[in-house]
Image: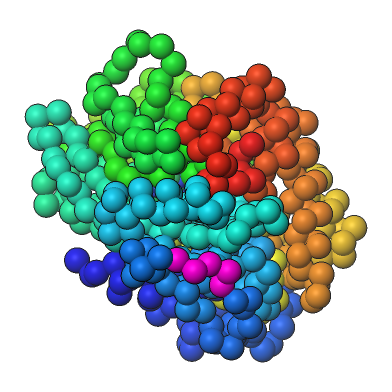
Amino acid sequence: MTSAVDSWRKRSWWGWGYESEQLEGEALQELVKLAGSILQLDSAPLYPPEPESVDLPQSRIRLPDSLNTICATDNFARLLHTYGCSYKDVVRSLHGIVDNPPDAVCFPRDESDIIKLLGYCSEHHIAVIPYGGGSSVVGGVEPVVDDDFNGVISLDMAYMNRVLEVDRQSRAALIEAGTLGPELEHQLKGHGMTLRHFPQSFARSTLGGWIATRAGGHFATGPTHIDDMVESVRMLTPSGVFETRRLPASGAGPSPDRMVIGSEGILGVITAAWVRTFQIPEFKATSTYLFSSFDKAIQALRYLVQSGLQPSNCRVIDPVEALINQAGDGSHAIMVVAFESAYYPVTDLVALADQCIRDHGGTPEGEHRAGGSATVWRDSFIRAPYIRDALVRFGAMLETFETAVTWDKFDRLYSSVMDTTRDVLQRLDLSPSIVTCRITHAYTDGLAPYFTVIAKAREGSELNDWNELKNAASSVIMESGGTITHHHAVGREHRRYYDIERPDLFARALGDAKRVMDPSGILNPGVLI
Ligand SMILES: Cc1cc2nc3c(=O)[nH]c(=O)nc-3n(C[C@H](O)[C@H](O)[C@H](O)COP(=O)(O)OP(=O)(O)OC[C@H]3O[C@@H](n4cnc5c(N)ncnc54)[C@H](O)[C@@H]3O)c2cc1C
């Protein structure tokens, strides 16, 4: 296993993933040829500034030796922990706009380091921002805090990255919170297990981050939210340890686990969790269906998820999104359906689902063309964040909005978001532009639409334009009865919409819980409450 030191130093400080994986050379030229002609992009790419050339304010913090040895204050470390991975973050980094870097980055080796840090920061009124993989797209790790703090420390969990214990009988594992997706799966595989939690950000997000943000995996159905996988959780707070009991289920009052899941770093630092794991599936089948319209595909999706067949995946992609991902020709919506099992062949389930989908207007892709749209789409899904970064360097705007809504409200929400975003793009003169939609998750009572906006950005007003678009889309999602986020969390960007969504009494109760666990209010101030 690569040491944590090696791995965080290799990350891209300005964009997604790892520096060595960013698109360069031929791959970049190919992309620009393909997308550039449609979006009329600039011909010369922007290059991120060298970390050492970025002028950062001097660190305001003088730490005692016991903490100094586990902290970094060099430009690369501070820049890496300034932003997450949203479009807005990439634009600011590429332009060298770095207003609020952390004063220091702390890399605890174990819980005793965290206890020391929380004690010191509570005493000296220094804000602490827990940091997992830094893949937040909602400003969750951005060190924007009130002026009365004497500094900000980003607390990076990179070194706490081990599977500590495995309970084969209960098929569960105790895993440290800083473990990144690939490290976690690699270690579990040695025990014949998988957590089976694969968000698109899998390569650069951690178990602690997933729990803190209630992350959603890429399986569209079944257990896909991390909420369902958490058996018990351990969190260090300035007031002491918060650890829940390992139980398969419980009816004992409001769940203490649920207080930690989704807490976004405001109550404490999650250090480890017992998670329910799965046996690695042996039987898998994926099929793709074509529909004459997105609307028809959505209807079929509802019948399928309400049929009780429980596919592991069923995503619907609109014709334009299928086209730009090279998974279709733009004339059909696509549905990707998958079944899997560790124990029995899934052939019968595939046949039943096939009948259900055909009955509702789907045609198996094989009857249209040979080849696998599902594979093409999956590959482009994994590479998408690198492609996004490359296009932004050539002057494109790429943003996504995601939500969930009950079936009865979907039509209204879908048309309102499409119309509103198109109106804003037109008003801002962001042309050419494309708005697409795919359904990432489906439930018996509703679904999670995910909208993508791609446009040629206006040089110099990228951030203002992004703001207008984001606010218009968020407002219309709320007005149409959706949630401000199905899986991207609240952070700083969704805060004001979250305030509308949750009951006022709940906000007060959460505020009181924070005062008990974090009396000095140092943990991720500005997020959630
Ligand atoms: C390209 C891309 C694709 C994405 N796809 C998905 C997706 O498919 N599904 C999905 O759910 N999300 C997705 N996201 C959003 C993001 O990856 C998730 O929110 C993820 O769960 C964050 O994990 P992280 O380890 O990177 O946390 P960070 O970004 O480091 O932190 C996120 C929040 O959690 C808090 N936090 C982190 N670690 C801890 C800890 N140990 N204790 C307490 N608080 C902590 C932070 O303070 C912050 O508020 C995507 C993001 C990108 C950039």
Rendering coords of residue 461 (x, y %): 81, 70
Q: Which residue is rendered at x = 33% and y = 64% of the image?
A: 66
User: Please, is residue 398 above or below residue 268 in the view?
Assistant: below
Magenta span covers which residues? 59-63
Count the marks.
Answer: 0
Rendering coords of residue 196 (x, y %): 29, 43
Q: Which residue is rendered at x = 35% and y = 11% of the image?
A: 252
Q: Is residue 188 magenta?
A: no
Rendering coords of residue 95 (x, y %): 68, 78
Left of 232 or right of it: where is 467?
A: right
Closer-to-camera residue (284/224): 224
User: Please, is residue 415 above or below residue 83 in the view?
Assistant: above
- Quarter of the image for residue 354 reads top left
Closer-to-camera residue (120/204): 120
Closer-to-camera residue (1/193): 1
Q: Which residue is rendered at x = 44% and y = 41% of the image?
A: 238
Instruction: Note whether residue 449 is visible.
Output: no
User: Please, is residue 489 above or below residue 454 in the view?
Assistant: above
- Quarter of the image for residue 42 reads bottom right
Left of 170 or right of it: where is 506?
A: right
Rendering coords of residue 245 (x, y %): 27, 24
Left of 348 or right of it: where is 407?
A: right
User: Please, is residue 314 above or below residue 179 in the view?
Assistant: above
